[in-house]
Amino acid sequence: FRRHLCMHPLIPVDDEGTCLSAKEIQQAAVEDMYQYCYKNDLSQAWAYLWNRWYCPKMWPLWARSASPIIARLRTTMLVESLWKDLKRRHLRNFNRPRLDLVTHIVITNLLPGVLNKLDYILDRRRDGRAKPLNSWQKAFKRDWEDMGRTDEHRRVEWELQVLKKKQTATAHNKKDRAQELAWIREDEQRQRGTYYTNIDDWACSCPSFLLSRFLLCKHIVREVNQFFDNQPRDLR
């Protein structure tokens, strides 16, 4: 389901750079979900998924491929967050308030906070001072730095984190630690796949890029770092 959500005509699906059209993505997603429900005898689940998610009427409401561009936001979470703030903070003491009261509360209580936040985002409140990173910018930086490391470096750090965990006497925790170390060994022996990567189009056919929050993967990051010779650049 998550893969169906994230697929887009601008994102390649194989190592040759093949891209599917929006119609082909929809047809493949419907076929994939139908076959899964058919093999697992989930007729009721398929009826729900088709009527509420995969039918032609509902598909454009949630699928990324329905838009010609890749949207920054995947869901309506910002609007839902605004409604949550309005209902639980400003209207929590009112049961079915009148429209004029709601309008007054929105103008006097809700909008000032929104305007202050907008000024902060547009850097209008910190003249002459360095602007701090937002939470998503910190997450982007953390992912970029992690993906820019070599596979061996990442495995060593992963192994050190596992080995530094406090030892406990329970057999369950010992088993978990042994399992993580086994995963590291399997990852070291695993054969690496080949994927189509194009930094000009900012596209990669690997699964990590498709599901990434920031449209990042180690192939894109390492190719960009190599292009810039691992030196930070001001692209403004």
Image (cartoon, rainbow, N blue to C red):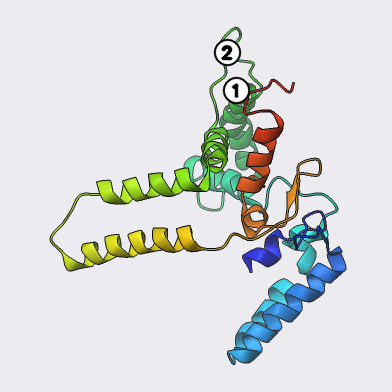
Q: Which residue is mark 2?
A: 126
Q: Is residue 55 above or below residue 103?
A: below
**Tags 2 and 1 in contact by the CB under 8 Å rule?**
yes
Mark 1 Cα within 10 Å, few/some/many (few <14, many 20+)?
few
Q: Which quarter shows the C terminus?
A: top right
Q: Distance of mark 2 from mark 1, alpha carbons?
A: 8 Å
> Residue 206, percent across and down?
67, 57
Residue type beneath disc 2: Arg
Residue 235, position as x, y percentages in the image: 73, 23
- Packing grade of label 2 (10 A; few <14, some 14-19, many >=20) is few
Element class at badge 2: loop
| Residue nearest the observer in this picture, 186 or 158 | 186
Where disc 1 sits, the SS reads helix
Relative vertical location of residue 153 with respect to residue 226 in this rendering, above or below: below
In the rendered image, is residue 93 in sight? no
Residue 203, placed above or below residue 232: below
Looking at the rendered structure, which numbered label has been put on residue 33?
A: none
Say whether residue 206 is left or right of residue 134. Answer: right
Mark 2 or mark 1: whose residue is earlier in sequence: 1
Instruction: Write down the residue under mark 1.
Output: 120
Q: Quadrant of residue 134?
A: top right
